Image (cartoon, rainbow, N blue to C red):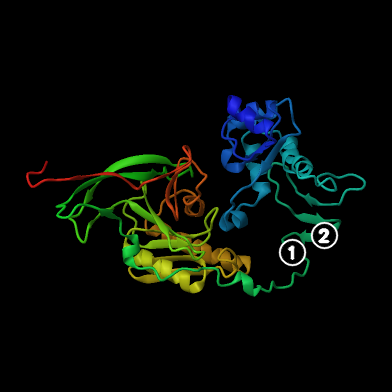
Amino acid sequence: TGRRLQTFRAMGIDSDHTVPSAEKLREELALGFTVQVQECMLNREIVQAMNDAPVQDRICLVTDDVPLPRLMRQGHLNFVVERAIELGLDPIRAIRYATINPAVRLRLYHTGGIAPGMEADMQLVQDLRHPRPELVLRAGEIVWDHGSYLPHTAPYQIPDHLRSSVHLRPVTETDFAVRVPVPSGFSGGTAVVNLIGQDGVSIRTQRVRKTLPLAAERDGFACLKTAPYLKMAVFNRYGRDQHGIGLLTGMDGVTGAAALTYGHDCHNLTVYGGNDADMALAANTLRESQGGLCTVENGKVLTLIPLPLAGLMCDLPPEVLLEQMEQLLSDCRRMGFNHQNLLTFFTLMPLAVSPELKCTDRGLVDALHKRLLPLIDEIKEISSDGT
């Protein structure tokens, strides 16, 4: 905000797709930004500010990180439009923010409206407040008609260079142990640990400091006792032998493990779990499948969704993938992963630019202060008399 925000604008940065408050929206519009409002940012105060804004051509409704189940069950931009209208946005403004304004922003001057010389990209809906497309035209041709997709789309042939993208040695249980260098003869004690605090709803996190027990020294190291906190590990999957470990609050007592190679922005291999054995099995399962998502419990792989295209995409029909994805999410919730937006949680906890604290293959990143943060801040030995 203030002069720092003005500096961004003066350097030529002229849009923002993370607008968390009505106050921020008004300030950015006044400074000449285009504001791009996601569904997760919508509330009545922001919607009222959008209705009242003196500038109407620099407001867009947008999406970001829409998981497949929500995409297929609720919709894409039509869902954002519907949600904004429910919160009080004028329906005509809502349609404008999702069509003409974004088209102009992206310099797609041939589309975004209905006029001579423009391509006929249109959808017909019964009710603007609940925009469910019944007929869709692309460049004047009907491509969707009352539940049926009409054009023939040839199956995609996966190029060889998109396969075999996970370059990672076999993972062992010891890779997940938090081993702290200690003096010889260290008899046990405590460590002050930086944890990732999460609230089970948003993707914004905070730094939480906890004191956890340390075991006695063995071969120059003491193992940190991390239970009952959820552990996450991020492995570099591009041939560099490095990984980072983090602990998260708000999801205690998870059984089993979940792993995925889809995780912003580096798309490394990220594993979450309540025990090291299941985490190792999950990591190695995706190493062998060369990418994907999987769940493991009690030494058994429950669900595996291979993603053979660069570890990020697959060639399954969407209906088949949806069924598998919902089964995977069901497994996760039963095992104690209780975030409101679970797929978003999984993919954004390794995102190094997202405030406040995240975990990467280089360890913890403090996004607010632009620095790497150690997992262990300090250690203390407990003497024989308990002091």
- Local SS, label 1: strand
Callout 1 crowding tier (Cα within 10 Å): few <14, some 14–19, many ≥20: few
Disc 1 or 2, which lies upstream in sequence? 2
Is residue 171 at all visible to an observer of this figure?
yes
Q: Position of residue 26 (x, y in %)?
A: 64, 27
Relative to 69, is 168 above or below?
Answer: below
Indicate the position of residue 140 as horizontal and vertical percent values. Answer: 86, 56
Which residue has dot 2 on it?
142
Q: Is residue 25 left or right of residue 220?
A: right
Amino acid at the residue labelled 1: Tyr
Front residue of 152/243: it is: 243
Which residue extends farthest left? 385
The residue under the point 92% across, 48% down is 117
Q: Amino acid at mark 2?
A: Ile
User: Cα distance, mark 1 to mark 2?
Assistant: 9 Å
x, y percentage for residue 120?
85, 52
Q: Which residue is mark 1?
A: 149
Whole-percent x and y of residue 248? 37, 48
Q: Residue at x 47, y 48 (%)?
A: 340
* Quarter of image, res 174: bottom left
Query: Above or below — where is 123 with respect to 93?
Result: below
Q: Residues within 10 Å of mark 2 (few under 14, many from 20)?
A: some
Image vertical order of residue 172 relative to residue 139, above or below: below
Q: Quadrant of residue 144?
A: bottom right
Residue 48 visible to an observer of this rendering: no
> Residue at the location (34% across, 44% down)?
194
